[in-house]
Amino acid sequence: MYAATDAIDTDEGVRFFSEKAKESGEFMPEIYFFIRRPVSEKYKKIFRRLARQSIIKLSLKITSKGIKGQYKKTVPYYQIGMPEFNMDETIQHNPLKIYKKSLSYRDIYGIERKRQKRKVVLILDTSGSMYGSLLLNAALTTSVLAYNMEKEDFAIILFNSTAMILKKVNQKKQVIDIIDDILDSEAVGFTNIYIGLEKGLKELNKVKENRRNRFGILISDGNYNRGDDPIILAKEYPKLHVIGMPAENDADRGIDTCREIAQAGRGKFYAVNNYKEIPRALIELLSQS
């Protein structure tokens, strides 16, 4: 590894990968993870920037396919430009006009689409069992969340043996800073889901608005080996969704735990086969919440 890093840790190495990144760049996050410790600080910043650019580009592509929390509302009027109208409401309120064929667009009940402002806390497992590809996909996942909810409120919690707030629910933080923090974090320690949920619930409870628009999203393999039973705390969430990742050991038990947490939190459960499916599962979940 160190021999390869010596070759990369040069002006020539930086130029080579900078040119390659222009062509695709999807491999740059993996390169950065490979060399981030032994490489010099001078070049580390450059490789981190190339990795971040790759993550942002891919997250924007994924996010563009998501629906940003819209809901429908029927209104007793139709205006030119409205994408839909409510046929049932129109018939119910205008039976005579329909019979006489005198219905005008003023009698039609329209459907407005409004953005529903949500408050979300993402609780992400970064324990030692999640090392490797997870942290790269954690950076992509948090980037997808940040772009999908750029005009809404969200918090990001990372947990292993302990939990840390990467972004507070009422904090303004640039996407590039969020990604950099993830890229330089470590997947270490044991798995304490309870402490992650505890920290997330405190952030969510800072918001006193409609409970329906507040929810948590837990991403974990479910195999906790420290802390109390997370199912106990899941019941205190307004709603808690879970994306279950594949575990290296005792995967069935972990997935069962993830499913039970989602049931206790009255949320949706998504099981993914590999880490690369997590960002798209997140988009699908947000589009339905």
Image: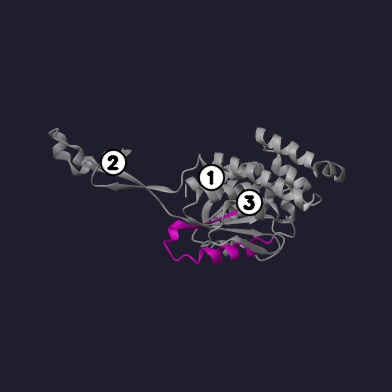
Residue at 62% x, 46% y is: 140
Residue 246 visible from this viewpoint: no
Q: What stretch is highlighted in magenta?
A: 192-220
Residue at the spot of label 1: 283
What distance separates the C-alpha of mark 3 from that of mark 1?
A: 18 Å
Looking at marks 1 and 2 on the same chain, the residue that comes earlier in the sequence is marked by 2
Residue at the spot of label 2: 86
Residue kind at label 3, given as amino acid type: Ile
Residue at the spot of label 3: 179
Near mark 3 (Cα within 10 A), the count class, few <14, some 14-19 or many ≥20, is many
| Quarter-of-image position of residue 157 | bottom right
Q: What element carries label 3?
A: helix
Q: Position of residue 73 (x, y in %)?
A: 33, 48
Front residue of 98/130: it is: 130
Residue at 69% x, 58% y is: 224
Front residue of 254/90: it is: 90
Residue kind at label 1, given as amino acid type: Ile
Looking at marks 3 and 1 on the same chain, the residue that comes earlier in the sequence is marked by 3
Q: Is the Cβ of the residue at disc 3 closer than 8 Å to that at disc 1?
A: no
